[in-house]
Amino acid sequence: MGNLREEFLELLRTDQEFRYAVLGLLGLDEIIKRLDAHGAKLAKYGEILVKQGEELIKLREDMMKSFAKHDEEFAKVWNEMAKLREDMRYGFELIEKRLSSVERDIHQMRSYIERTSLTLEEEAFEVISGKLIKMGIKIALNRLILPDLELNIYGVADEICVIGEATIRAGIRIVTSLNEKVNLLIKKYPELVRPKMIKILYTMWITEEALEEAKRSGIWVLKTTKELTSSPLL
């Protein structure tokens, strides 16, 4: 019996068909076959999982490469933006410098115009006063500043009133403006007007159009050495 048992066990270890025959007799062969089939399926699934794992690893590597590429692109864009900000800052500095220069130029020009205008007014007072004296009229000329009206030539004496403007260059707008100021003065400040009125425009240069309009409006146009229209007394 001992030898028979050892031979039986040896056959179970070494002979697959013998094992299945024994298992069949015991009713276990079907279970073993199913287990073997499941094992094959599991092995196949394992292969699939391994393949999917490899694909996931490759996908991760591709994503990392893509991220690295995008990081480079983002870094490039960021550098471009930084350069653009620097260029804009430099541009704003240039604009500020230019604006400061323009403001200085405007200030200097305004100062020059104010000095020139003051000198022109003083010259106008002297020339007009001299011509009026020759006409037998003595009037002190000054600026007239009211809340809604400003004239740089104004003076009254007895029944005569002198109203005018002094300007370097006279165009049609200056003539129109002088007439409008005279009408406003008559309407709102009649106490500053006299029965006889002399409207004067003292200028260094006047357009032909403005000169014609001054003649029609009865404005006495004067230059330093010349009368361009006759002296009206209205």
Image (cartoon, grey):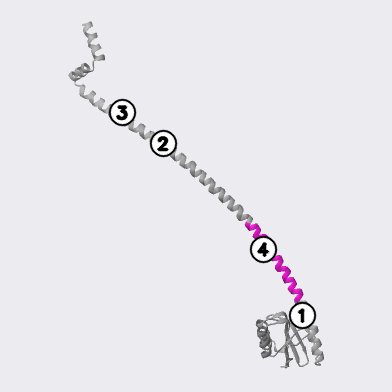
Labels 1 and 3 touching (C-beta < 8 A): no
In this figure, which residue is indicated by the disc labeled 4?
99
Mark 2 and mark 4: Cα distance apart in space = 60 Å
Three-letter amino acid code at disc 1?
Answer: Glu
Q: CA distance from mark 3 to mark 2?
A: 22 Å
The answer, for residue 10, to whether it is visible in the render is yes
Q: Earlier in the sequence, mark 3 or mark 2?
A: 3
Query: Disc 4 and disc 1: Cα gap in Å?
Result: 32 Å
4 or 1: tag closer to the N-terminus: 4
Question: Which circle marks residue 58 in the picture?
Answer: 2
Q: Residues within 10 Å of mark 3 (few under 14, many from 20)?
A: few
- Nearer the camera: disc 1 or disc 2: 2
- The disc labelled 2 sits on which kind of residue? Lys
State the residue at coordinates (67%, 63%).
99
Residue kind at label 4, given as amino acid type:
Leu
Which residue position is annotated with label 1?
Answer: 121
Residue 96 picture location, percent across and down: 66, 60
Mark in the foreground, 3 or 2: 2
The answer to whether marks 3 and 4 mark residues whose Cβ atoms lie closer than 8 Å is no
In the displayed structure, 87 sits above or below 55; it is: below
Magenta-colored span: 91-116
Image marks 2 and 4: residues in contact by CB distance under 8 Å: no
Mark 1 to mark 2: distance in Å? Answer: 91 Å
Q: How many residues crowd mark 1 within 10 Å: few (<14), some (14–19), many (20+)?
A: many
Residue in the picture at 49% in, 41% down: 68
Which x, y percent locates residue 114? Answer: 74, 74
Camera-near label (3 vs 4) is 4
The secondary structure that most of the magenta stretch takes on is: helix
What residue is shown with label 3? 43
Label 2: how many Cα within 10 Å (few below 14, some 14–19, many 20+): few
